[in-house]
Image (tube, rainbow, N blue to C red):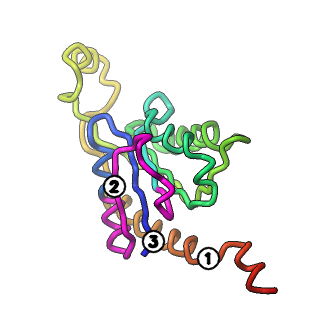
């Protein structure tokens, strides 16, 4: 049974809940799945595939999930990886989260020294509660109303991506590596 890591960064828990739901879908598809808060102590090489997610703040991920990938880049070059981002910007500006996600992934992970085998990406609207803010930020937010308050997660989309991802990962993990094909065809 293939082992899958679903690692995430989160500030207020919304991304953690999305990661847990994706992990549930992968487990239901027969994978041995761990869902963990991203940190550099995770031994990524014991997994057959990685699913890494983070909320987007100021058009970039939180440091922990990004560092997990960057610090392990040499050990995970042949491991299928899926990336997802969560954000509230799509609530007021549909499509903007995908733009920010794609630009950030390109900048952070598609460099000469960071070659990842990304097989799937997704973006999801998140949840935002002013209660989670420090008092002074609640006042500023109440005046400016920058971010809409509420839960905008679309669980059917999240579950659908989890199911599609399970199929993609199964195909990726069952496909023989090119060096194995060369050895068997001799």
Residue drawn 51% across and 56% down?
45
Q: Is residue 47 magenta?
A: yes
Residue range in magenta is: 21-50
Q: Residues within 10 Å of mark 1 (few under 14, many from 20)?
A: few
Q: What residue is shown with label 3?
A: 2
* Residue 123, image x, y percentages: 46, 49
Q: Quadrant of the image for the C terminus?
A: bottom right
Residue drawn 28% across and 50% down?
17
Residue 108, above or below 30: above
* Residue 79, image x, y percentages: 57, 60
In terms of image quadrants, where is residue 105? top right
Residue drawn 43% across and 37% down?
64
Give SS at disc 2: strand
Q: Residues within 10 Å of mark 2 (few under 14, many from 20)?
A: some
* Residue 126, image x, y percentages: 33, 43
Q: What residue is shown with label 1?
A: 175
Inspect this view and state whether residue 162 appears: yes
Q: CA distance from mark 1 to mark 3?
A: 13 Å
Q: CA distance from mark 1 to mark 2?
A: 25 Å
Tell which of 160 and 178 is nearer to you.
178
Tell me the mark number nearer the camera, choosing from 1 and 3: 3
Residue drawn 30% across and 64% down?
24
Q: CA distance from mark 2 to mark 3?
A: 14 Å
Q: Quadrant of the image for the N terminus?
A: bottom left
- Which label belongs to residue 35? 2
Q: Earlier in the sequence, mark 2 or mark 3?
A: 3
Residue 29 in the figure: left or right of residue 106: left
Q: Earlier in the sequence, mark 1 or mark 3?
A: 3
Q: Earlier in the sequence, mark 1 or mark 2?
A: 2
Residue 75 in the figure: left or right of residue 29: right
Give SS at disc 3: loop
């Amino acid at each position: 049974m293939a082992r899958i890591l679903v690692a995430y960064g989160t500030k207020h828990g919304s991304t953690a809940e999305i990661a847990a739901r994706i992990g549930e879908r992968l487990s239901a598809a027969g994978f041995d799945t761990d869902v963990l808060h991203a940190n550099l102590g995770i031994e990524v090489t014991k997994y057959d595939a990685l699913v890494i997610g983070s909320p987007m703040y100021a058009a970039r991920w939180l440091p922990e999930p990004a560092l997990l990938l960057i610090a392990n880049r040499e050990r995970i070059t042949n491991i299928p990886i899926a990336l997802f981002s969560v954000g509230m910007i799509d609530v007021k500006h549909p499509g903007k989260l995908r733009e920010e996600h794609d630009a950030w992934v390109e900048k952070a992970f598609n460099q000469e020294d960071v070659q990842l085998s990304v097989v799937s990406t997704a973006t999801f609207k998140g949840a935002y509660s002013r209660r989670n803010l420090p008092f002074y930020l609640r006042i500023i937010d109440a005046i400016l109303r920058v971010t809409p308050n509420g839960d905008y997660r679309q669980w059917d989309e999240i579950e659908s991506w989890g199911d599609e991802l399970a199929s993609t990962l199964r195909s990726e993990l069952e496909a023989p590596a090119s060096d194995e094909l060369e050895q068997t065809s001799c």
